[in-house]
Every structure is written in structure tokens, then in C-alpha cells.
Image: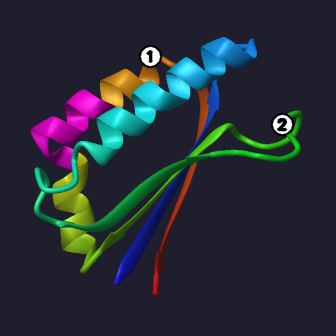
Amino acid sequence: MIRHIVSWKLAAEDEAGKATAAAEIAAALTGLVGVVPEIASLSVSRNIAYADKNHDVVLVADFESLDGLDAYQVHPEHLRAAEIVKARVVARASVDYEL
């Protein structure tokens, strides 16, 4: 099992803008469940502490294999969701590891 974690710092600086952007990102990414067959599980959450240091939003997704993660990365619906994310963030970090 491969765990894929991605976090983002939102471009919005005010709370209302951050809330809207986070909701739009969550909707785009959670909408991939059942569409991209390689996704074993996927969740999107918002940071609740240390906003001055931490990223604002995190994705945690599990895949059966690296091949599944690779297929997810190039799936057309994921590419569409990624464009929604990119338009709302200023920084990204990620890590993939084996469970």
C-alpha cells in the first residue's frame, strides 16, 4: 500500500477566502473517489493549528501500488482537479511512502 500526502499553502490571505478555496479544493479532489479506480482511500482536511508555520490544506490518499499512484497522477480527471488546486495555492509539498 502506498500513502500519498500532499499539503498546500493557500494563496488567499483572509479567512473567508481560505475557507472558500479549501472547500473548492476538497470538492475537486474528493470527487475523484469512484472516478479514478486506483484510489483506495482519499481525504482532504484543513489545518487547525499554527497557521503561521503550517500549510493550510492536506490530501491523504492510499493506493495499492506505485503503479496505481502513477495512474492516478495522469488520469484526466485528476489533471482537471489539479488545475483547480494550482489556481488556489502558492506552495506545495508532498511525500509518498509504503505502508
Lower position in the chain sequence, tag 1 or tag 2: 2
Q: Look at discs 1 and 2 and give the one toward the viewer.
A: 2
Q: Is residue 59 magenta?
A: no
Cα distance between the residues tagged 1 and 2 = 20 Å
Count residues near mark 2 (Cα–Cα under 10 Å), then give few for <14, some for 14-19, many for 20+.
Answer: few
Q: Residue at x 53, y 19 (%)?
A: 20
Q: Which residues are magenta?
A: 74-81
Question: Which amino acid, mark 1?
Answer: Ala
Q: How many marks overall?
A: 2
Q: Residue at x 14, y 54 (%)?
A: 36
Q: Residue at x 16, y 58 (%)?
A: 71
Q: Which residue is mark 1?
A: 87
Disc 2, SS = loop
Question: Which amino acid, mark 2?
Answer: Ala
For residue 46, which quarter of the picture?
top right
Q: Which mark is residue 18?
A: none
Q: Main secondary structure of the magenta part?
A: helix
